Image (cartoon, coloured by chain):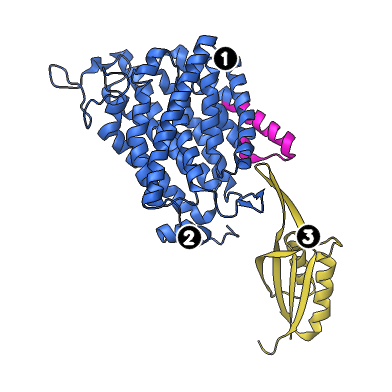
Chain colours: A blue, B yellow
Amino acid sequence: MELLTINNVWMMICTALVFFMHLGFSFLEIGLTRQKNTINVLFKNLFVITIGLLLYAFVGFNLMYPGAFNGYLGFSGFGLSSPLNAQGSLDLTYNNNYTYWTDFLFQGMFAATAATIVSGAVAERIKLIPFMIFTVFYVGLVYPIAGSWKWGGGFLDKLGFYDFAGSTLVHSVGGWAALIAVCLLGPRIGKFRDGKVRAIPGHNMPLALGGVLILWLGWFGFNGGSVLSADPASTSLVLVTTSLAAASGGVIAFLVSAAIYKNLDLTMFLNGILGGLVGITAGADKMTPTDALLVGAIAGAIVVFAVSFIDRIRLDDPVGAIAVHLVCGIWGTLAVGIFGALAGWKQFTTQIIGITVYAVFCSASAFLIIFTLKKWIGIRVSEKEEIEGLDIHEHGMVAYPDFRLNEH
Amino acid sequence: MKKIEAIIRRSKYRVLKEKLHDIGVTFFTYWDVTGVGNEKEGHVYRGISYSTSDIQRRYVSIVVNDNFEEPTIKVILEVAATGEVGDGKIFVSDIQES
């Protein structure tokens, strides 16, 4: 009983930490976008966590963990139903390490992260209502079905595909949707002009940094809780691998970007930290600290090149979501077959199979949802609304009423 | 009376204020503006280099009696002129009444 209590307490702390990451995402997105769209970004982020949690309670949890199922699609009913023992109270033999409620809530906090990744990539030009509709379908259906294939015990789990805390299941799932959305949405006005890529600087660097450090803190719960117990050996190792990857990702990213672009760019440093975190997420419990350093470092370098590449193929990603979550998510998943305890050719090929499955499923479903929305109600605000700012047009409010800010 | 409007580098404002007080000019107004001209500032953001000629300046507006016109202009020139591109401008106009 004490063991269950100890494990459950840790899991609940991790639940709260993962929840806190939504503040991190909000701050980061606001910091890297323009002041005239701040309320819109905040609104999208709040919507994602609130509706995400509600949907997970209503359908998501039981789609993702349907119990015994055919491995592809299963559903154990609408709403939450806690297991009861003979006396009619909560059955604590549900799991050695957490209660049913903790299981639901911890997993529920992950669900919304997938859509929040998309909100950064589509910022400053997407219409709010289509985004909300997209979120409902993507978080409500796509994320849990995709998750069931590995964490729910489905066919990828049986195949040996490994994703400790969600480099693929959370970050790439969000990343593929972000990529599709950015393709269908188009760039912000003025981003690509006269054949050149133009900078659209964010309006609040302190918030951006605050966001990333909050995300790093939240990752203590994201990875630490994915151990699914308070086992001292695994949890303490996972926290170390997580933080080392973040640190090396950041350092390598700023060094690489300084070497190429001749400046010390704060936002590249920040993206590098996140890239390292995403990269280690698939295998944090299978890596030694040295492995983690390398995985993070490579992720940091990848982020810098990915940001520039995505610009060059004329895709506008204001916050680097695709570079950080999709590209580093794929890297982190592959890294499980290259570094650490599971390294080996067989694992590597299994990881590729898993990555491909998710690539196809997530891209196809994101495309279906967003393309339908585009044809039906349109997904992009008008040119006038985009130039004058979404805050005043979609919300009728401004984020900093008394504050005179420059151009943005 | 004369209105002397000076667009200066922001870094020069503090010293300008002190020196204006020294010569007895103690009432004026300023606001922060963006100036466009020949000076360029180089920026790099996420790998994209660009230079902008939109640079933040301070616009100081001083209304003085006619006998203060020359001393004020002299002080502004002493404090704010560096010889580099982007030092700013001084405009003098007449004020009928105050």
User: Which label sits on residue A338?
Assistant: 1
- Who's the residue at 50% across and 62% down the image? A384
Q: Is residue A20 left or right of residue A407?
A: left
Disc 1: CA contacts within 10 A as few (<14), some (14-19) or many (>=20): some
Pointer 2 chain: A
Which residue is label 2 attached to?
A: A385
Q: Main secondary structure of the magenta part?
A: helix
Q: Mark 3 points at which residue?
A: B39
Please tell me which residue is depicted at 41% across the width and 30% down the height of the picture.
Answer: A361
- Per the image, label 1 sits on a secondary structure element best described as loop
Q: The C terminus of chain A appears in which quarter of the rendering?
A: bottom right
Q: Is residue A260 magenta?
A: yes
Q: What residue is shown at x 55% (from left), y 30% (from top)?
A: A327
Q: Nearer the viewer, residue A367 or A50?
A: A367
Q: Give residue A154's mark.
A: none
Q: Is residue A90 left or right of residue A204?
A: left
Q: Quadrant of residue A308?
A: top right
Query: Mark 1 vs mark 3: same chain?
Result: no
Disc 3 residue type (three-letter): Glu
Amino acid on which disc 1 is placed: Ile
- Residue A397 quadrant: bottom left
Rounded to the nearest angstrom, the CA distance separating label 2 from label 1 is 48 Å
Task: Choose mark 2 or mark 3, whichever is in front.
Answer: 2
Q: Mark 3 lies on which chain?
A: B
Query: Horizontal placement of A16 versus A405: left or right?
Result: left
Q: Give the range drawn in magenta.
A: A246-269
How far is the residue under mark 2 from the one under mark 3? 32 Å
Estimate the x, y position of residue A281 in percent, counting from the top left.
Answer: 49, 23
Task: Please tell me whether mark 3 sits on a helix, a strand or a loop.
Answer: strand
Q: Do the numbered discs 2 and 1 sit on residues whose CB atoms are within 8 Å?
A: no
